[in-house]
Image (tube, grey):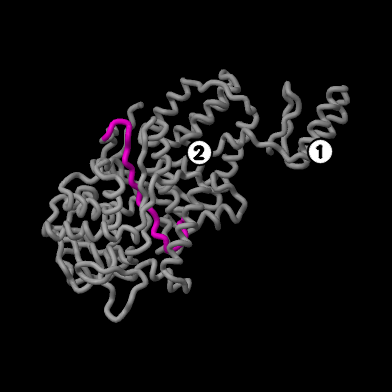
Amino acid sequence: MSTIFLYNTLSREKEEFKPIKKGQIGLYTCGPTVYNYAHLGNLRTYLFEDFLKRVLLFNDYKVKHIMNITDVGHLTGDRDMGEDKLELGAKRENKTAWEIANFYLAAFKKDLENLNILAPSKWYKATETIREQIKLIKTLEKKGYTYKTSDGIYFNTVKFGGYTKLSHQDLKSLQEGARVEKNDEKRNLADFALWKFSPENEQRQMEWKSPWGIGFPGWHTECSAMSLKGLGKQLDIHCGGVDHINVHHTNEIAQSEAATGRKFFNYWLHGAFLIISGGKKMAKSEGNFLTLKSELLDRKISPLAFRLAALQVHYHKPMEYSAETILNADQALKSLYGRLEELGEKVGKINQKYRQRFITAINDDLNMPQALAITQQMLKDNTIKTEDRVATALDFDRVLALNFKEQLSWQAPQPVLTLAKTRDEARQVKDFSRADDLRVKIEGLGYKVADSSEGTRILRS
């Protein structure tokens, strides 16, 4: 195992990664709130987390990966006010909240599949871990961290001394989220809901009995309960988007450490926003979100073009998105595939010089742009045997996940292969005029012709 360096939001420094258990890693990534399709900004975060997981696996670590599914409790307001997003989605589509959750969870999993994002070791749904969440709140209550208001049970942030250690903010300067009205019953502006009561004279679709009354868990409560259940004391790395730093992840740390009396995750990694025209982040609340289906699949563009675009920008930097961006990435992907196809299917030995350069790049806080550049340089390096370049590319693709193996085994349609065979026969009898005519015909169908010692090779244009 080589040394890995990761930028830790907790310390604001790049640190040498040291797992709690030798050779094993506990990884938690914040999953989706399944009330709508994931947009490309969401998916960029899941891609960065997949890069991380694949880098860890490439370094021979065993990774236990937990991802939550928020199917209840995520309110439209930043600080526990507004309507539950699942209930809102149910009204929007005239379905039950359960139907909404199941539909958009399936859509999310399909997006992950299309982008070659590895599935977690275990999925946890908020609605399936209510018992664990209630247990966590009861522990906090016994330790004196909670208080009751007319709408729920809240965590008193003033009683937790390290509340801002992740965000590095001044607690006194914290303001309520811009999209919500002030809650006068909260003792402190940063206090957050652990359990919300169902509204009087209104039955929610998703609600449960609790020691404090019928209601549902707070969004922050879910992640703490699920990560502690799934990983126990193996709390190595917690990931998410930068928008989670100041509120969601800050609240997770506070309630978890208050309840357990021990550190909650050693490393915190956060991916930057996807930026669209006008310099705005992509968000459902902004009404400017674009999906994998609308932007790529419906336009017959490979979803892996978006993966390649994400590889070209370091996860710490905002990624600009436009129609031109994805078209350029699609062309770059096709060019990369073209180089691979020219090398052929024969697999040799992995070039250790390039492999070491690749490992150095990916282990330096996931420097995927550099790793991609090294891959492209290696493919063009004629000092390396063709078959060794193929083997090295396949090795690197364990991290890049751009389907190199599938491209190497690609074959043209049978009618085109028949034309290629006829052309070979013409060349064998030195009928070069006919061979040239057949080349033109094949190229007219949208393919490239390459001559090799084994005969005519057909490549995609």
Residue 373 position, x and y percent, is 49, 32
The amino acid type of the residue labelled 2 equals: Ala
Residue depicted at x 35% and y 51%:
30
Residue 115: give x, y in percent of width and height. 51, 46
Magenta residues: mostly which secondary structure?
loop
Check the picture and name the quadrant holding the N terminus: top left
Rendered image quadrant of residue 89: bottom left
Residue corresponding to mark 2: 401
Q: Circle 2 — which element? A: loop
| Number of the label disc, if any, that sits on residue 15 | none
Tell me the kind of residue under disc 1.
Lys
- Work out whether residue 252 or residue 230 is closer to the camera in this orientation and state it: 230
Q: In the rendered structure, does residue 28 fall within the stretch colored magenta?
A: yes
Q: Closest to the observer: 72 or 11?
A: 72
Residue 12 can be seen, yes or no:
no
- Rounded to the nearest whole Å, what is the CA distance between mark 2 and mark 1? 34 Å
Secondary structure of residue under mark 1? helix
Please state the horizontal and vertical placement of residue 125, each as a whole percent of the image: 36, 57
Look at the numbered discs 2 and 1 and tell me whether their residues touch, using CB distance below 8 Å: no
Q: Please tell me in which quadrant of the rendered image residue 328 appears.
A: top right
Quarter of the image with the C terminus in it: top right
Using the image, tell me which numbered label, if any, was put on residue 441.
1
Horizontal side, residue 345 vs residue 373: left or right: right
